[in-house]
């Protein structure tokens, strides 16, 4: 090789590399990314793992001595903002049906919420890929285009780039297909009140997004007894003060009555209410469900909107621990009649008391036997 070619060749290669930089980058990405994912295959992913995952523990019923509507917010456990568990696949199947067959009822977005929905998907995807790397993978083709792959379902969604632009509905749908939570975007109106600007609420308790999209938080809680007197002002202040660095969470519980032969979809999707399907038969303890919600609140840094998440947990009454059953019985005794009426106590209250007394008798008999 001549001295000339030794000098010229690298220069020519450099010029070509600079000129075709974008093509080369894309080519490397197309080869390197699948290769990197193949090499990850030794840490076995996906559905088998998720089937073994116990649910993130829902807050126990506190057993308060006096009834009061409480904000009861605490700092978010950020490592477990979005959680996965053994119910992922069956709940995902329910979400899939609802998003297809009841689309208008379960997902809505107002035009002004589009950017926030896209930001929500980016934040959700980033969290899931970092927290559960064997179940979700980022496919970053270049700086401007990225997708997320759900290894458990095989679904893939554009997170950034031209394929992910639009009115926000697709982005919000992708986010709730990835997670086990319902997700909503809260925005502030001209009067300084937060309102429901976008929502994918697949597991509602007596309402639908279709009828309540655009409602303020205050109006959403219209039917909730004592809400306005006891927490409305604190909730407004709390939402206004939320910063991207101070995400919060709170818990709620309801009591639901199901039919013995009801499918999961009918149990989770309850737009009419939680006790309205009750008929004249007495519900059995396994048909009375303690329905807990873990609610999370995050301020999104770019759109400055609030991302509100709700994860639903179901526990049949006969699987409730004795201390929690005691707490439920203690709390229901403190409810004024109109609060009990709102919560459906007339449907399930006597049955819960009867079941509790039965368990107390069994516990006492066991104790007596041990003492003999
Ligand atoms: C710190 C904030 C919040 C507090 C303290 C709060 C509190 C409550 C309470 C106490 C109930 C009644 C539950 C029961 O049966 O005991 C309720 C119901 C409800 N909440 Fe909230 N909530 C908050 C935020 C939100 C947000 C952001 C939304 C937005 C979607 C929301 C939507 C609802 C709806 C739709 C109901 C059912 C109302 C009905 O019966 O029609 N809540 N909330």
Image (cartoon, rainbow, N blue to C red):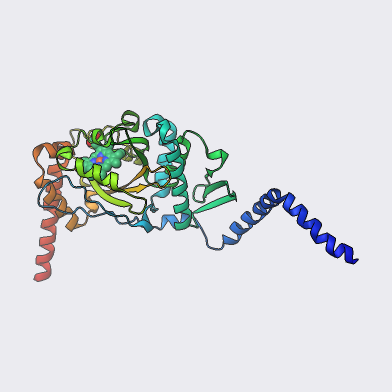
Residue 326, percent from left and from top: 14, 54
Q: Is residue 172 left or right of residue 290?
A: right
Asked if residue 97 is positioned above or below residue 69 in the image, the reply reads above
Task: For ligand 1, give the image quadrant.
Answer: top left
Residue 29, percent from left and from top: 64, 53
Q: Is 102 in front, or is 162?
A: 162
Residue at horizontal 29 percent and vertical 47 percent from the top: 241
Say which quarter of the image contains residue 280.
top left
Asked if residue 168 is positioned above or below residue 121 in the image, the reply reads above
Say which quarter of the image contains residue 346.
top left
Q: Is 25 in front, or is 357?
A: 25
The answer to whether any part of residue 23 appears in the image is yes
Residue 96, percent from left and from top: 44, 39
Q: Residue furthest bottom?
A: 372
The answer to whether any part of residue 261 appears in the image is no
- What is the quadrant of the N terminus in the image? bottom right
Q: Is 13 in front, or is 358?
A: 13
Residue 276, percent from left and from top: 22, 33
Residue at horizontal 20 percent and vertical 41 percent from the top: 233
Q: Is residue 68 left or right of residue 288?
A: left
Residue at horizontal 21 percent and vertical 57 percent from the top: 321
- What is the quadrant of the C terminus in the image? bottom left
């Amino acid at each position: 090789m001549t001295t000339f070619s030794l000098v010229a060749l690298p220069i020519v290669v450099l010029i070509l590399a600079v000129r075709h930089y974008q093509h080369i980058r894309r080519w490397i990405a197309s080869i390197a990314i699948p290769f990197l994912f193949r090499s990850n295959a030794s840490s076995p992913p996906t559905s088998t793992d998720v089937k073994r995952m116990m649910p993130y523990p829902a807050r126990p019923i506190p057993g308060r001595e006096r009834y009061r509507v409480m904000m009861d917010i605490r700092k978010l456990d950020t490592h477990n903002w979005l959680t996965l568990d053994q119910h992922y696949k069956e709940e995902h199947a329910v979400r899939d049906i609802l998003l297809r067959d009841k689309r208008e009822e379960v997902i809505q977005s107002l035009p002004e919420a589009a950017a926030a929905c896209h930001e929500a998907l980016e934040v959700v995807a980033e969290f899931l890929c970092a927290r559960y790397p064997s179940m979700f993978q980022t496919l970053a083709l270049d700086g401007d285009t990225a997708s997320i792959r759900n290894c458990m379902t095989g679904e893939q969604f554009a997170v950034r780039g031209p394929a992910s632009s639009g009115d926000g509905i697709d982005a919000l749908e992708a986010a709730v297909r990835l997670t086990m939570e319902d997700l909503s975007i809260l925005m502030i109106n001209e009067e300084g009140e937060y309102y429901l600007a976008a929502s994918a609420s697949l597991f509602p308790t007596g309402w639908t997004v279709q009828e309540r999209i655009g409602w303020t938080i205050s109006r959403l809680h219209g039917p909730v007894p004592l809400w306005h007197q006891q927490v409305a002002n604190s909730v407004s202040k709390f939402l206004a003060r939320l910063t991207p660095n101070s995400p919060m969470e709170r818990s709620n519980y309801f009591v639901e009555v199901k039919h013995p032969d009801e499918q999961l979809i009918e149990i989770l999707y309850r737009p009419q209410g939680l006790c309205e399907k009750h008929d004249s038969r007495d519900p059995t303890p396994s048909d009375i469900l303690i329905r807990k919600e873990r609610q999370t609140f995050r301020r999104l840094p770019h759109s400055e909107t609030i991302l509100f998440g709700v994860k639903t947990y179901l526990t049949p009454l006969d699987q409730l621990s004795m201390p929690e059953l005691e707490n439920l019985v203690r709390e229901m005794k403190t409810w004024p009649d109109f609060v009990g009426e709102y919560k459906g106590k007339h449907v399930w209250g006597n049955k819960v008391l009867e079941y509790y007394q039965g368990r107390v008798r069994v516990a006492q008999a066991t104790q007596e036997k041990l003492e003999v």
